[in-house]
Image: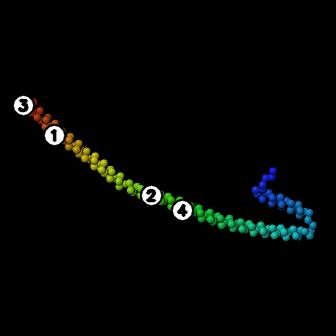
Amino acid sequence: MTRPQMDEEPNINENETNKRKNVKSLEPNNYVEHIIQLEERNSILTLQLEHYTQDLNRKNAIIEKNVKQVNSLISENKELRSQVQQQRIDEKIPTYVNDVKSDLASDDKHFILMSIIWSIAGVFFGFLAVISAFFTLYM
């Protein structure tokens, strides 16, 4: 069972090794032809390298642009969350303040009522004490 070739690099390396072996066996007339082929191959590879470099630069620029957009969206999202939280706080503060005011007013009424009751009780028992003092003095 043969394994499918995933990468062409081993094949290229084998081809280069075979070409080197073939160069040794070439006759002097074929050297010039072989050099011309190598120069053509070199120019093709140089053009491919330039193409890949340009493609890489273009893709890097796209990646940088996308990263900037993502960072911008993240900061905008944080700002919007902050604004939403502030709006919720602004909506809840008045109701909270009103609830506290009504609770304090209710407590205030309760304590005023309790103070009136205690003062009446104090006056009553004070008056009762004065009467019993006169009663024990003259009786």
Q: Horizontally, is 104 left or right of 138 in the view?
A: right
Which residue, given by chain and number where applicable, does mark 4 sit on? 72
Residue 77 or residue 3, whichever sits in front: 3
The residue under label 2 is 84
Instruction: Kindly indicate whether the residue at mark 3 contacts the one at mark 2 (C-beta within 8 angstroms).
Output: no
Do the numbered discs 2 and 1 sit on residues whose CB atoms are within 8 Å?
Answer: no
Q: Residue at x 92, y 63 (%)?
A: 25
Label 4 crowd (10 A; few <14 / some 14-19 / many >=20)? few
The mark lying in front, picked from 2 and 3, is 2
Identity, as a three-letter code, of the amino acid under mark 1: Val
The numbered mark, 3 or 4, whose residue comes first in the sequence reads 4
**Disc with the residue nearer the chain's start (2 vs 3):** 2
Mark 4–mark 1 Cα distance, whole angstroms, equals 74 Å
Residue found at x 41% / y 58% = 87
Q: Which residue is mark 3?
A: 138
Outermost residue on the right side: it is 27
- Mark 2 surroundings: few (<14), some (14-19) or many (≥20) residues within 10 A: few
Q: Position of residue 15 (x, y in %)?
A: 83, 60
